[in-house]
Image (cartoon, rainbow, N blue to C red):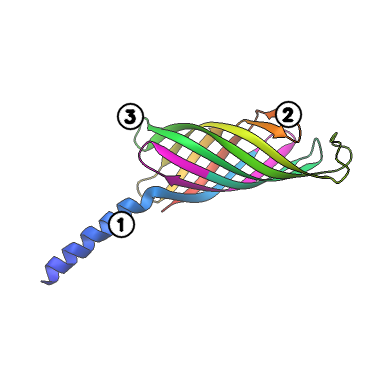
């Protein structure tokens, strides 16, 4: 009887551990010549092909003296690379909402120095997860077309993400 209970507990534990890899939480870091950004990043797998990513971030742009708090949501299609174990690539798109803070020298017309922001992002990247530890690394390219407050294309956004898978 003890063996049967032990086997049931072990099988349930393995099933829970296998099912528990649907989430990943970590950070995404990116930067350029005159800006840098940090984001808290969360991913949720819907199935083997589809997942969603939600990132809460803060960007500082020294060129225009702009601070930017934003929330990005991306729907992604994920594909395994059969030639390399645990390596995959993905692409997706989604909205970005944010709040800009800027000084009078930034070129924006709003005298209040705050503005709402709305944009659309695209994303393409590669990720790798380890077998021995629940860690995921990814490198991606995420351009954004801002529609509000001004139409601006920010294309030079390459990011490195490190996430704990659970």
Q: Main secondary structure of the magenta part?
A: strand
- Return the x and y of residue 131 as percentages of the image width and height: 35, 46
Mark 2 residue element: loop
Q: Is residue 149 left or right of residue 74?
A: right
- Return the x and y of residue 70 as percentages of the image width and height: 66, 45
- Return the x and y of residue 42 as percentages of the image width and height: 51, 48
Relative depth, front residue between 90 and 34: 90
What span is colored magenta in the figure?
A: 31-53
Looking at the rendered image, the quarter that the C terminus falls into is: bottom left
Q: Nearer the viewer, mark 2 or mark 1?
A: 2
Q: In this view, does 16 lie above or below 112?
A: below
Label 1: how many residues lie within 10 Å, few (<14), some (14-19) or many (20+)? few
Q: Name the quadrant containing residue 86.
A: top left
Q: Which of marks 3 and 2 is in front?
A: 2
Alpha-carbon distance for marks 2 and 1? 47 Å
Residue that carries the numbered disc 3 in the rendered image: 82
- Return the x and y of residue 21 as percentages of the image width and height: 37, 50
Alpha-carbon distance for marks 3 and 1? 26 Å
Residue that carries the numbered disc 1 in the rendered image: 16
Q: Nearer the viewer, mark 3 or mark 1?
A: 1
- Residue 151's tag is 2
Q: Residue furthest bottom?
A: 2
Mark 1 residue element: helix
Q: Is residue 50 left or right of residue 143?
A: left
């Amino acid at each position: 009887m003890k063996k049967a209970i032990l086997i049931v507990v072990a099988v349930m534990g393995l099933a829970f551990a296998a099912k528990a890899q649907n989430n990943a939480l970590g950070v995404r870091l990116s930067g350029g010549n005159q800006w840098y950004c940090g984001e808290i990043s969360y991913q949720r797998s819907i199935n083997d092909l589809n997942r969603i990513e939600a990132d809460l971030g803060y960007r500082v742009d020294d060129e225009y003296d702009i601070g930017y708090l934003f929330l990005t949501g991306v729907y992604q299609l994920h594909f395994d690379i059969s030639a390399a174990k645990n390596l995959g690539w993905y692409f997706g798109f989604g909205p970005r909402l944010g709040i800009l803070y800027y000084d009078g020298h930034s070129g924006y017309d709003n005298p209040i120095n705050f503005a709402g922001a709305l944009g659309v992002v695209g994303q393409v990247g590669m990720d790798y997860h380890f077998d021995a530890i629940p860690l995921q690394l990814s490198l991606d390219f995420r351009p954004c077309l801002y529609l509000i407050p001004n139409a601006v294309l920010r294309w030079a956004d390459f990011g490195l993400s490190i996430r704990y898978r659970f």
